[in-house]
Amino acid sequence: MPTKSACKVSLSFVLIVAMFVSLLPGAVQKVHANVSPGDIAIIGFQADSPDKLAFVVLNQIAAGETIRFTDSGWYSSGSFRANEGGIEFTASTNLTPGTVISRANPFTSGDWNTNNSGLGSGGFSLSASGDQIIAFQGDASSPNMIFAVQAGADWSEATSSNHQCRTRRVSRRNNGRLYRL
């Protein structure tokens, strides 16, 4: 069983890297109309009461963009297990690289909302014995995958008969390139 510290990524390291990348000479930062793999990174979460989630912005994100997060597993057939739940964050302003967004449950105020559509009705509730968080945009039936993190178990098939902490590694094609999240 992983400890809280084993499930968290060093926030300071990620922030230093994000700020360095954003300050590279000649770097032109463009506000993205859609969020792509590599535009955010989940840098921490807590699976105890209350559940918490934190991510860092690595590429500018336009106001109005919505990012959904779920703890539902991903089948190799290309769909969510849809037995848990989801939340979503909608940027109220343009977000610049290095911005850290964090929230503790309940995820129902400010720029956060509950959105279980296509993900099940169990609610976003991280398991202390292991779970996954998958960030995506759009409809759960055809998601635009952005980022995925797995804690407490390996990347293996999510089935109805195994523990909720399992999920298949998410892959995505974009302009002919294969991304593994």
Image: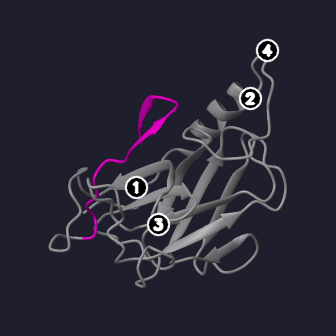
The CA span between labels 3 and 2 is: 28 Å
Q: Mark 3 or mark 2, which has the lower sequence index?
A: 2
Pick out the residue farthest to the bottom: 121
Mark 1 or mark 2, whichever is nearer to me: 2
Query: Residue 19 lies in magenta, yes or no?
Result: no
Q: Residues within 10 Å of mark 4 (few under 14, many from 20)?
A: few
For label 3, the SS is strand
Q: Give the Cα separation between the discs numbered 1 and 2.
A: 26 Å
Of badges 3 and 4, nearer the viewer stands 3
Which residue is denoted by mark 2 in the rendering? 22
State the scheme by which the image is colored: one colour
- Was residue 180 drawn as part of the magenta stretch in this picture? yes
Toward which corner of the image does residue 106 lie, by quadrant?
Answer: bottom right
Mark 3 Cα-neighbour bin, 10 Å: few <14, some 14–19, many ≥20: many
Tag shown at residue 25: 4
- Asked if disc 3 and disc 1 are in contact, CB closer than 8 Å, the reply is no
**Which residue appears at 33% of the width and 59% of the height?**
74
x, y (%) of residue 124?
Answer: 47, 76
At horizontal 72% and vertical 79% (from top left) the residue drawn is: 109
* Residue type (three-letter) at the residue carrying disc 4: Pro
**Structural distance between the alpha carbons of marks 2 and 4:** 9 Å
Front position in the image: 52 or 36 = 36
Give the residues in magenta. 164-181
Instruction: Identify the residue under disc 3.
Output: 70
Query: Which circle's residue, 1 or 4, is located before the other in the chain?
Result: 1
Q: Is residue 7 left or right of residue 58?
A: left
Element class at badge 2: helix
Say which element carries label 4: loop
